[in-house]
Image (tube, grey):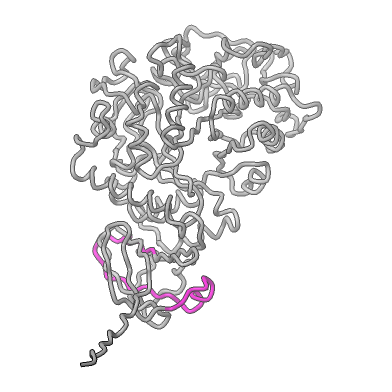
Amino acid sequence: MKTIIYQLLPRTFTNYNETRKRNGTKEENGCGKFAEITPKALNAIRDLGVTHIWYTGVIRHATAELNTPAITKGKAGSPYAITDYYDVDPDLATDESKRMAEFESLIRRTHKAGLKVIIDFVPNHVSREYKSLNKPKGIKDLGEDDNPNWAFSPLNNFYYIPGERFNPQFDIQGYDEYPAKVTGNDCFSASPAASDWYETVKLNYGVFYQGGGEKQFFPIPSTWQKMLDILCFWARKGVDAFRVDMAEMVPVEFWHWVIRYVHTFFPEVEFIAECYQPALYRDYLAAGFDYLYDKVGMYDYLRGVTSKNWAVEGITQCWQQVGEMRNKMLYFLENHDEQRIASGFFCGRGACAEPAMIIAATLGTNPVMVYAGQELGETGMDVEGFSGMDGRTTIFDYWGIRSLQAWANHGKFDGKLLNEEQKNLRLFYQRLLTIARDEQAVSEGEMYDLEYAQGEGFNKHEQFAFLRKHKDDLLLIVANFDDKQVEVKVTVPQEAFQYLRQSEYAEATATDLLRDKVFKHICFKAATPVTVTLPAWQGMILKITPEQKKKARTFRRKKE
């Protein structure tokens, strides 16, 4: 089964408060809860075609209410400024004293709905005010045994700037740090800028960056063992996979070591790496990662095709560039870091991403991800507070998202408050993701890129076509990025039939799985292009089956 991930931020996903006050507090703007992600909600997500839910922002992180506001981004804080690896965000609990039990209950509900659980693992940095009050007995805290007089030592969990006080390039009040620690984005200065990850500090895995990058990995650094303990803590609670934040900023040797150990106790746990350097892809897959972000490849190109009129035929080069790794790449068009498709910064309308989404979901057997609200055309154009009008849905502020509120309908999850465009878009995602999950030609089969073979009647700047096949199941997938309806003639070369071990059909039926349209008596042979009419910004997933010739009926005259 193909992995289909649905990313959601519990803080916003079930927040039904419609106040939406800029820089509003939790009391003013509300906050979603674990308990409100009900079986009804989970079943509705599963019925979208989803196999995994990535719960973003679960582990306890800095908030303006409980930490120093000057070094906290927004009232709700960044989910990536962890304050306690062994705790969950109290904001997400109905009863804060039972917050861990409430999250454990959510894990059980998710599994009962037939879905797997993904959470973030943030290994590179923590909040400047990190302190675990909930670590298991016998576990030492990060930095507990550090010697802050050493700028670097493999015995330390942090990097220090001895003799200097933390003094960022903006005003801070109520916070003092001496000696200063190195900031999370490898800023080895006591005076980070506002554009740096100033709210975080870098963790030390035994790499002496200011000593030429020397690696001191023997004996095993203290940080390695502490991170292993944290991963096993969450795996024991039933977490099925970790989306690893900025995995490439942590040495690959650590991943070889820790993933092997985790798999000793939890062999089914998966790891997904946020990685933006193609030169490192093979190293991180060899270290044990199951999947890698394909942000700088397929995401960037599909966005360029959709919003910048890049040539569609360049998609071929994207999947070819990663070679045999292509089925290990995670495709997506939205996540919490990227601008919403329907925002004014991307293409202004969620439906315009249909052809790109078809390609992302069906080109390979690799996973695909959607971000909560993407299937509803969420614009992300609110001015929430710390997050301004940037085309993204805030991860720093308490906020209610209009499209999700309309779909959830105060916990009914029946979509009755959606407008027609939103309903149609969600139906498209439901059909597409279900096809990607359930059709073996997509989830297990082979792909043959048809772009190179196209000639007259096919605009390679605006259309893309490919075949997928598994045993007797054959799909012809065609996507149109043009802003007008076009008639497309798709050529299937003889080489495609040979490569896929596919028979030619003098007469075949093509069923569009996305819209239940049936086209009969088509000729599916190398010598005859398949002609389809595609509306603007749409595509077809055509299931090709041979037509059975009717046998002539014979009548035998009865003997008199």
Image quarter of residue 135? top right
Q: Return the residue nearer the eye: 317 or 90.
A: 90
Q: Residue furthest bottom?
A: 560
Which residue shows up at 31% across the image and 80% down it?
A: 550
Highlighted range, magenta: 477-504
**Residue 469 location (% of width, % of height):** 47, 65
Is 551 placed above or below 298 here?
Answer: below
**Residue 351 location (% of width, % of height):** 28, 49
Which residue shows up at 37% across the image and 21% down it?
A: 35
**Residue 460 location (% of width, % of height):** 39, 68
Is 316 placed above or below 549 here?
Answer: above
Q: Return the residue nearer the eye: 321 or 159.
A: 321
Q: The C terminus appears in which quarter of the rendering?
A: bottom left
Q: Residue furthest top?
A: 174
262 left or right of 458 in image = right
Magenta includes 501? yes
Which residue shows up at 45% across the image and 49% down it?
A: 300
Magenta includes 482? yes
Which residue shows up at 40% across the image and 46% down it?
A: 333
